Image (spheres, rainbow, N blue to C red):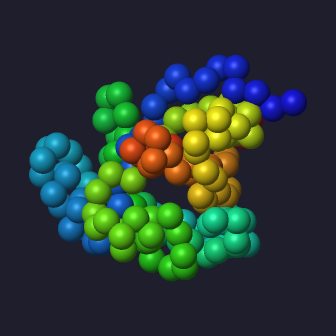
Amino acid sequence: MASCKDGFKRVAQIGIVVRDIEEALDFWCKLLKIERPRVIETEEWEKTRATYKGVPTRGRAKLAFIELDNVAIELIQPIDGPSTWESQLNAHGQGVHHIAFVVEDIDGCVKELENFGGVREQEGLFEGGRYLYADLLKTLGVRIELLQFFK
């Protein structure tokens, strides 16, 4: 049986959706006085097996991770296919999309989130792990991303 016994103890990142990742990076790098991180693109569906609202999706994005001492800021520019990022950008414009927690057991922890009104929104694989977004906008005012790294 899946469990979330270790809970949500480590915030890994704050995700922000943007229309233009290069422009957003210009701003953040000047503000934080940091070197520009590289921009990556998420993989094709054959590698990510991404689903959005239970339906397979390409759901691709450009990503940049600004690593700070205590947390990362993840900038996300949707580029292809339906996704939670594209939905947020179209409905609300640029802004905070999620708070991400590193967990040991996504399946157990998503059950905890569902107990608080969370709804699975998007999930998939990335190199070295798995992610899942739960929509808790009605109860907490934010999405929660769960990150599980393979051992």
Q: Is residue 110 left or right of residue 137?
A: right
Res. 124 image quadrant: bottom right
Res. 38 image quadrant: bottom left
Viewer-closest of 87 and 116: 116
Res. 71 image quadrant: top left
The residue located at (67%, 49%) in the rendering is: 130
Total tally of numbered discs in the picture: 0
Q: Is residue 21 visible?
A: no
Q: Position of residue 72 (x, y in %)?
A: 37, 40
Q: Is residue 134 left or right of residue 6?
A: left
Q: Position of residue 151 (x, y in %)?
A: 74, 35
In this view, 96 is above or below 44? above
Q: Is residue 83 left or right of residue 15?
A: right
In this view, 77 is above or below 36? below
Q: Is residue 35 visible?
A: yes
Viewer-closest of 50 and 109: 109
The residue located at (70%, 72%) in the rendering is: 56
Q: Position of residue 4 (x, y in %)?
A: 69, 26
Residue at the right extreme?
Answer: 1
Q: Position of residue 40 (x, y in %)?
A: 45, 64
Picture quarter with the N terminus: top right
Q: Is residue 89 left or right of residue 11?
A: left
The residue located at (15%, 57%) in the rendering is: 27
